[in-house]
Image: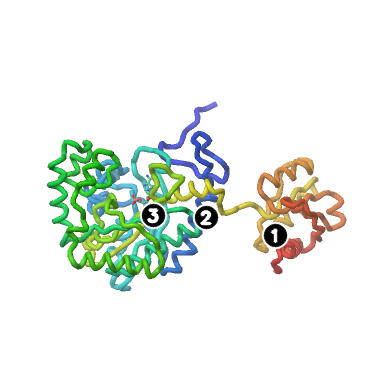
Amino acid sequence: MSQKIRGVKGTRDVLPIDTYVKDDDPWVRVGHYDLVEQSARDLFPLYGYREARTPILERTELFVRGIGEVTDIVGKEMYTFDDHGDSLTLRPENTASLVRAYVEHNVNQQEPETKWWYLGPMFRRERQQRGRYRQFTQIGVEAFGSPGPRIDAEQIELLDRWLRRLGLAFEMHLNTLGDAACRPKYRQALQSHLRSRSQELCEDCQGRIETNPIRVLDCKNPKCQEVAAGAPRMEEFLCDACKAHFAGVQEALQRLGVRFVIDPKLVRGLDYYTRTTYEAIATSGLGAQSTLAGGGRYDGLVRDLGGPDVPGIGFAAGVERMALLLAQQGKERATQPLVFIAPLGEAEAARADQLAQELRAAGLSAEVSFRKANPGNQLKRADALGARFALVLGDQELKAGRAKLKELRTGAQHEVSLQGIAGEVARLLGTPR
Ligand code: AMP
């Protein structure tokens, strides 16, 4: 036998069957992902968001300029390669790509306000742990053209509703990072505080003092947290416009009935954020990687990437983490067949294929057995597939043109005519066709 080839570290197969026996997590199947994805497809358009699809491959400079050279993502986590002289990168997030597309296609000339949502894989070379992978899936939204604060609140309310609909337990954290007018002063004050206590910081944070001091605030190292606790707070430095904006977001959230907590430590990892930042943090079930979704305003990004001066705000949610929570709750989008048909002989098999075809043509899912087995084993197979009904087709049934449709959950038997099988099944479901 040849040697097996294993999947790449930090990537996962998501199958319709149970996998990942090795950790103590429940099995995450496609049905769990599907539930997350379908609920976004149903809900986001109700808020005016339309789907946008951009390539997984982008020019490396897009992320270097968009996300910022000193961030962890650009500094050490990107999958970058040379493509005959062009440096390309597998996207580590999608905001920069959507901004690129927005600018490239002059979208602001067609519409003053734009709302897009997206779904797809992202790639970061991170240390793998539960809820953190090297290929993962994000669902996110971006709203261009509205300076806020009402759109900020509308978007946070959308995230809140989505997670609630899925039955996930979380807390919404809210903060403001100020803008180009007030953040530099805060940064200076923070830097001088950090410099005075640099010996107490971890090695990474010592480097961050000069490059990205705000990130020290959300370092997980207990010593860094202690230094952060005594640091000056953004709140004290906000300019009047940023203060008014932040108050406006909070008022609008209260009007919409969204609960939130103010979290001054919520700084987000990327350079481009201004003013509003927010995160939905799971209250149980995930351990260290508990942030389900994070977002914020990025008023300078479109301009920085060569576009007009158009403000923006968005969030990205991690589908793997949400799917894991749904798996813990045993919730998934069902893909089981409705009717399982088991023919016992050759002539019956030919008829079974036709019956399945008729059911499918009527929009009813049907699975037909291709294996020879006795009726008992066929019923076991129907059960394993999670079928609602099983129909065993033998010589007798074929001759009579009638058969018993067994409801697997209850054991109830319904006699049906094979002629017009789709109508019979629809009748049993209570949905006339
Ligand atoms: P970010 O783009 O870093 O703000 O991440 C937004 C969300 O994406 C996070 O809250 C996570 O739910 C998810 N996420 C980010 N990085 C990863 C990863 N490496 N593995 C799985 N999910 C991730």
Please tell me which residue is depicted at 41% across the width and 66% down the height of the picture: 257
Q: How many numbered dots are placed on residues in this image? A: 3
Secondary structure beneath dot 2 equals helix
Mark 1 or mark 3, which has the lower sequence index?
3
Please tell me which residue is depicted at 24% across the width and 63% down the height of the picture: 299
Mark 3 Cα-neighbour bin, 10 Å: few <14, some 14–19, many ≥20? many
x%, y% of residue 417?
81, 61
Q: Is residue 17 above or below residue 162?
A: above
Q: Residue 359, labelled with which disc?
A: 1
Q: Is residue 345 above or below residue 104?
A: above
x%, y% of residue 88?
29, 47
Q: Amino acid at mark 1?
A: Leu
**Disc 3: residue Cβ within 8 A of ligand 1's nearest atom:** yes
Secondary structure beneath dot 3 equals strand
Q: Nearer the viewer, mark 1 or mark 3?
A: 3
Secondary structure beneath dot 1 equals helix
Q: Residue 35, labelled with which disc?
A: 2
